[in-house]
């Protein structure tokens, strides 16, 4: 057992808020996210697609905090509640374009890279529907949200009801 005291701002419910405990590292992740946002825009990925990727990856990782944040961002960007409500079963709907399907499959393969077959299938679909710049941007968006998901899940960031 360690005698080291904890900073009450960076520990809650026995979990270290790694973003607050190590702000320099977290700030670097935020800067990476900003660069990835620019990369996605430069590649031609619209904000709705970026948010769909953020949400799908956050669903796979079980990150309530990021789901809350990115649901609101997706709605602001113009996503419909129907598409957001069916995102977990996107393969079973007609609500997503081939381009979006390719991006979502690639984001899932980025999140679960050990599934080599799914990765190859996703990459083939991406090659058929996305440019190389778009493929790169999708992968970077997925990598970045995966990192934020780990920060929030391991820190157990709370999701609170909006204030009335």
Image (cartoon, grey):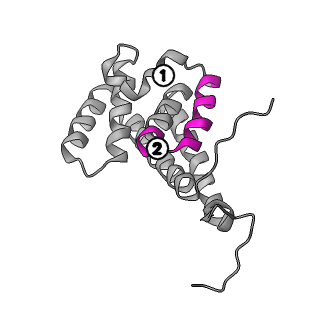
Q: Which tag, 1 or 2, sits closer to the chain's start?
A: 2
At which x and y percent is residue 67?
Answer: 55, 37
Badge 1 vs badge 2, beta-carbon distance below 8 Å: no
**Residue 5 is covered by the magenta coloring:** no
Magenta stretch?
Answer: 58-76
- Say which of 104 and 3 sits in front: 3
Q: For mark 2, does the 10 Å Cα neighbourhood hold few (<14), some (14 to 19), or many (20 or more) residues?
A: some
- Say which of 81 and 25 sits in front: 81
Residue at (27%, 38%) from the top-left corner?
Answer: 123
Q: Name the residue furthest left.
A: 117
Q: Main secondary structure of the magenta part?
A: helix
- Say which of 154 and 28 sits in front: 154
Residue 109 horizontal side relative to residue 133, left or right: left
Q: Quadrant of residue 161?
A: top right
> Which quadrant is the C terminus positioned in?
top right
Give the labeled residue for mark 1: 85
Give the labeled residue for mark 2: 62
Residue 99 horizontal side relative to residue 42, left or right: left
């Amino acid at each position: 057992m360690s005698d080291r005291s904890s900073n009450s701002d960076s520990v809650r419910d026995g979990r270290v808020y790694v973003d607050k405990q190590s702000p320099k590292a977290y700030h670097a992740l935020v800067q990476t996210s900003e660069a990835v946002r620019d990369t996605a825009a430069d590649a031609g990925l619209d904000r709705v697609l970026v948010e769909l990727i953020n949400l799908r990856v956050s669903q796979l990782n079980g990150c309530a905090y990021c789901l809350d944040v990115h649901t609101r961002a997706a709605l602001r960007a113009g996503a419909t509640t129907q598409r957001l409500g069916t995102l977990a079963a996107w393969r079973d709907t007609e609500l997503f374009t081939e381009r979006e399907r390719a991006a979502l499959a690639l984001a899932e393969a980025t999140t679960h890279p050990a599934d080599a077959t799914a990765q190859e299938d996703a990459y083939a679909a991406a090659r058929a529907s996305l440019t190389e710049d778009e493929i790169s941007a999708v992968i970077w968006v997925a990598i970045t949200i995966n990192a934020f998901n780990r920060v929030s899940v391991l820190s157990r960031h709370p999701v609170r009801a909006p204030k009335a």
